[in-house]
Structures are given as structure tokens and as C-alpha cells.
Amino acid sequence: EIYTLSLHDALPIYAIAQVAKTAKRGAIAEGLHIVKVAAAARPGVNVQRGVLTISYAPQGGPSARPSSLAIARALEAAL
């Protein structure tokens, strides 16, 4: 399925790009294989075994998603 990215959808991509500018670029390329964006009861970020899962709460609007800074920090800590 192909769809147009909203700003909400594009934020995880922005966060990954920000971390990729750091010295950990190689670690991201080696360690991150899948990015999942999923609806959940509350927002969150999880990185396990090369999978970045970004959870958002659909009913909460833009504030019900993790910030790009939170995503970047989770990536830096995990990789």
C-alpha cells in the first residue's frame, strides 16, 4: 500500500536522520533493520534486535506520539 506521509508519519524518519548525522551512523546502518509505527494505548519507543517500534495513541492527536528527540535518544542508547 502506498500513501502520502503526513508530518506525524515523517517524524520517525527525521529522528533517524538526525542520529545518522552523529558518529553512530555505522551502528545505525548495521543495527537497525525494521521501523514499525503502531497504534497503542500510549506513546512510546522501543528498540530490540534491530527493530525500532514507535507507538502512538491515535485519539490523542499530535501530542500522543513520541518526540523526535525521544526517538533519537532511544536509538542512540540501543545502538
Image: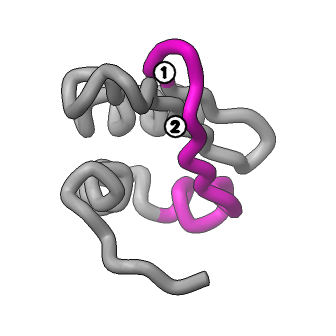
Q: Residue furthest bottom?
A: 2
Residue 14 to residue 66: above or below? below
- 33 vs 45, left or right, is right
* Quarter location, residue 78: top right
Q: Which residues are magenta?
A: 26-44
Please tell me which residue lies in front, 19 or 60.
60
Q: Residue at x 33, y 78 (%)?
A: 4
Quadrant in which the N terminus is drawn: bottom right
Q: Is residue 4 visible?
A: yes
- 3 vs 33, left or right, is left
Q: Residue at x 51, y 27 (%)?
A: 45
Q: Are marks 1 and 2 in contact (CB under 8 Å)?
A: yes
Residue 75 to residue 7: above or below? above
Q: Residue furthest right?
A: 49
Residue 45 magenta-highlighted? no
Q: Horizontal and vertical percent for residue 8?
A: 27, 50
Q: Which amino acid type is marked by label 2?
A: Ile
Residue underneath mark 2: 54
Question: Please, which colouring scheme is shown?
Answer: one colour
- 28 vs 31, left or right, is left
Q: Residue at x 34, y 38 (%)?
A: 72
- 17 vs 52, left or right, is left
Name the secondary structure under disc 1: strand
Q: Horizontal and vertical percent for residue 20?
A: 34, 60
Quadrant in which the C terminus is drawn: top right
Q: Which amino acid type is marked by label 1?
A: Gly
**Which label belongs to residue 44?**
1
Residue 15 to residue 29: above or below? above
